[in-house]
Amino acid sequence: MMVCMTITMKNYGLTWTATDCTRCSSAVSYDEPSAKDRKQELVGARCVDVTIVEVEPGQLLEPAT
């Protein structure tokens, strides 16, 4: 008997405010561990309001205004 498991890939993007107060968003999507790593990089670079957002495949985020 063969059992098939479906793996659902979730995609994540990030939004943040840069140190010059510019609102930004990621131009790529990440898997969850990579999104968390990128968030830590941005926080380490003193960006604020860093948020991980689940996105649909192929969807790019627009920075908040």
Image (cartoon, grey):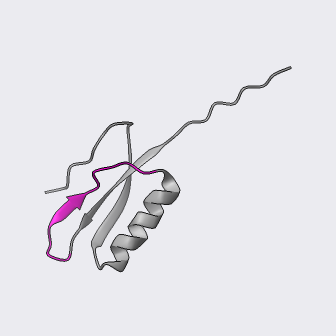
Q: Is residue 21 magenta?
A: yes
Residue that appears at 32% across and 66% down: 50
Characterize the magenta stretch by its predominant secondary structure: loop
Q: Quadrant of residue 42?
A: bottom left
How far across and how far down the image is residue 8, in percent?
Answer: 56, 36
Which quarter of the rendered picture does the N terminus lie within?
top right
Q: Is residue 35 left or right of residue 18?
A: right
How far across and how far down the image is residue 16, in percent?
Answer: 27, 64
How far across and how far down the image is residue 36, in percent?
Answer: 46, 63
Which quarter of the rendered picture does the C terminus lie within?
bottom left
Give the total number of marks visible in the rendering.
0
Residue that appears at 44% across and 58% down: 35
**Vertical side of 51 occupied by 13: above or below:** above
Q: Quadrant of residue 64?
A: bottom left
**Vertical side of 38 occupied by 64: above or below:** above
Question: Over which residues does the magenta segment extend?
Answer: 19-30
Residue that appears at 20% across and 55% down: 63
Q: Residue furthest top?
A: 1
**Vertical side of 51 occupied by 40: above or below:** below
Residue that appears at 33% across and 49% down: 28
